[in-house]
Amino acid sequence: MKIGSLAFKDMVFGYGDHAPLFGGVTFEMPCGGNTLVRGGSGVGKSALLKILAGLLAPKSGAYLIDGRDVREMAFEEFLPYRKRIGYGFDYGGLLANRTLWDNLMLPLQYHNELGLDAAEERVQELMGAFGLMAFRDRRPAAVSGAIRKAASIARAFVMRPSVLILDDPFVGLDRESIEAMFGLVKSHRESHGLEHVFFTSRGESVSYKLADRVVAIERGLLWLDDGSSAAGPGERKAVGQ
Amino acid sequence: MPLARFLFREIDGIGRRAIEIASYTLQVLQMVYLSVRAAIYDQAQGLRTVFSVVSAQIYFTGWQAMPLVTMLALATGGIVILQSSAQLSLLGSAEMVGNLMVVIIVRELGPLVTALIVIARSGTAVASEIGNMRVNREIEALEAMGINPLSYIVFPRIVGGVISVLCLAFYFCAIALLGGFLVTRFINDMPFAFYADSLANAFTAADVGLFLAKNGFSGVIIFIIACYQGLLVQQSAHEVPQVTTKAVVNSIIYVTTFNLGMTTLFYLNQLMALGIL
């Protein structure tokens, strides 16, 4: 199953009683390629990624995947889409009572996606790419933050997603792991059906190396910038609303 | 006028509290429905996954609680036998000891004490475990992996909890009735055959129904409230002890109220059967 379009229509979102982070966004997320979501602290970068992954629901308006409103879908109706979306957390997100190996095996085993041997081979390949095999039998609390972060990103690749969403992937990762992540994005795009990548950044220059384009969050709206460069986004091309 | 104002304020307060309780109860019941629905609809979650969580829950809730239940059952059974046999002997109705034991242990204390033990040991553990999972974003991670937390976490805990509470309550009653008799043997001259005969005559089919209903629903109440409270945690670790305390308090209130309601219905039914009502 491929995911072709991701769009918002009059989307309003805010946490609890706080002021809305997004106030009526109508915007088609740029698909294909790698999209950096840029914005200051607290503007809603992580919230946007979670909405894209279906982890948060807009308060009003619609989030449309292939034209279908996610808010209208029950968990099981959204499941086929969810299985095609890989999500890497900025921190946390690993199951504390499972080893790193079991954390990566869980989605494959739960969804009976592969036979045991094939699943183990895939997990071994991903853990090997990030140099995690030495820690495979340790639980998240017994490893460093960098290892946890790498494991969380590796798990995002495990179901060979069509949409990859990474929240602050560069924070806490060493240079080798960042290179491994770039390599996995490239190889999954070439041969494993990865189509759309969305990620946030705290302004690390390396983020522009991965980005094909930039979506900025300003004043509760989304803006598309084209021609991103190492210095940052270029000319503003479209307005979010 | 000040009196009227005071009265209206009090009535307003009672009304608000009643609406809060009704709303809370509805939300908890909604979660029971959603958990069962999720477990049925979740095609991916095989019996193996459910069984592994259920068996772990039975181990922690049932098996590990047995030493504490044994001690409390022996003490409770012993106390009730000593007190009741002494009083009944004075009244010349020693053969009623079985009836008294069934009424006090099987119908009332067994379900209630077992529920309180499970709330103290496992209700707190489940609420804090799920609360910590929320803080560590494990619940979000499950959703991101396409695993419904209601079918993966909540449903097996309810099933495991109900089985554990039923087994523990049965164990409590057995130990209290038989073990309690044995530990008081050295100060109680009642023959065991007499005691066993009195017990056998006291049991009715209605007792079995009451026992299953009280303990089964107590298990559901304890674990659904623990899971619900745990899932209420938003982002901060300091919320975890707060929801755990709330889970304990609410579980005790709901379990004791439910037990009282069941007992009342049971006796009303008996009075109707006797033609008194």
Image (spheres, rainbow, N blue to C red):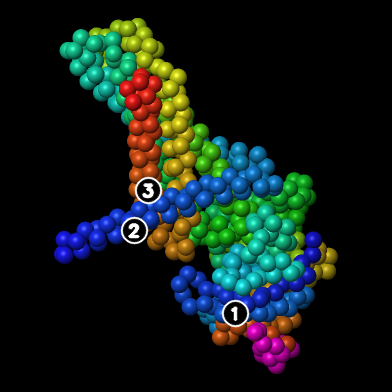
Q: Nearer the viewer, mark 1 or mark 3?
A: 1
Residue bearing the label numbered 1? A24
Question: Who's the residue at 35% across and 28% down the image?
Answer: B268
Q: Is residue A143 visible?
A: no
Image location (x, y in percent) of residue A134: 64, 56
Q: Which residues are magenta?
A: A227-241
Question: Who's the residue at 46% across and 57% down the image?
Answer: B232
Q: Are marks 1 and 3 in contact (CB under 8 Å)?
A: no
Query: What subunit carries mark 3?
Result: B
Q: Is residue A75 visible?
A: yes
* Element carrying mark 3: helix
Q: Amino acid at mark 3?
A: Asn
Image location (x, y in percent) of residue B185: 28, 13
Could you say which quadrant of the image residue A205 lies in? Answer: bottom right
What separation in Å lies between label 2 and label 3 (alpha carbons)? 17 Å
* Element carrying mark 2: helix
* Numbered tag placed on residue B232 in the rendering: none
Q: Amino acid at mark 2?
A: Arg
Residue bearing the label numbered 3? B250
What separation in Å lies between label 2 and label 1 (alpha carbons)? 35 Å
Image location (x, y in percent) of residue B254: 38, 43
Q: Amino acid at mark 1?
A: Gly
Residue bearing the label numbered 2? B16
Q: Are marks 1 and 3 in one subunit?
A: no
Which of the two residues, B114 or B203, is positioned nearer the viewer here? B203
Question: Who's the residue at 57% across and 78% down the image?
Answer: A22
Question: Who's the residue at 65% across and 57% down the image?
Answer: A74
Height in image: A1 above or below B148?
Answer: below
Residue that protrudes farthest toward the right in the picture: A191
Query: What subunit carries mark 1?
Result: A
**Apparent side of residue A31 relative to residue A75 in the rendered image (left or right):** right
**Apparent side of residue A75 relative to residue A140 in the rendered image (left or right):** right
